[in-house]
Amino acid sequence: MRVSSTGGRFMTTHADRHHPLLSAEEPAQTVQALLEGIRGAREAGLVLMRHLPAHGPVAEAVAEAVRAGGFSALERVRLECAYAEARQEEPADGVIDVGHMSSKARKEFRRRVRAIEKQAGAPLTIVDRSEDQDLVEEFLDFQAAGWKGDPAQGGGAFRLDPHHERWCREVLAGFLEDDALLAPSALAKR
């Protein structure tokens, strides 16, 4: 049996979410068209969509498309992650959603936030940087400054590969141009 996947080396290295981009107006129809296209081309007997959110519009769109198209779905593994929605400067604890996480995962997440706040000497806040023209350069600099910028540590920063860096710039520029980039950033301001 052939398998189609939203994963792969590039996505696993660079993306927390692997689901396809969906139409805001018709998200379920977008997923269903994708699944129908794969089924119609007989490209795969199994479609593996990795790192899908368990709640929210993407999860709802996938569930609706599966029901409407007569597909079978099986959840293989579930990871617990906190997430934030893009909003103007608000305290992190008022924006980061952890309600869906187990009590153990929530406790660990909050412990990490407190450690960051203690080290920074300021509360963690969420700042919407979606329209910040310096965001792309700052993101590429930040990513390359850590272990991801070191090939000896298995890093895969965009700056280590000119094709990946160009792709990142083009994608982010397109989202900025379409006013579709969501870039909430966690900051500890003094």
Image (spheres, rainbow, N blue to C red):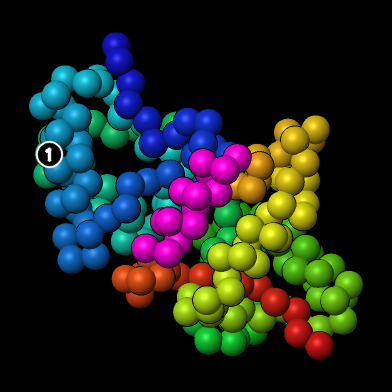
The residue at 33%/47% (across/down) is: 20
Residue lying at 59% horizontally and 81% vertically, measured from the top left: 127
Magenta: main secondary structure: helix
Residue 13 forms part of the magenta stretch: no
What span is colored magenta in the figure? 161-174
Tell me the SS state at disc 1.
Answer: helix
Which residue is at a point 13% across and 35% down the rendered structure image?
36
Please provide percent x and percent y for residue 163: 51, 41
Q: Nearer the viewer, residue 186 or 145?
A: 145
Quarter the N terminus occupies? top left
Residue where numbered disc 1 is placed? 69
- Is 149 in front, or is 30? 149
Q: Position of residue 112 (x, y in %)?
A: 78, 63
Query: Does residue 22 appear left or right of residue 86 in this picture?
Result: left
Q: Quadrant of residue 50 in the image?
A: top left
- Mark 1 Cα shell of 10 Å, populated few (<14), some (14-19), many (≥20): some
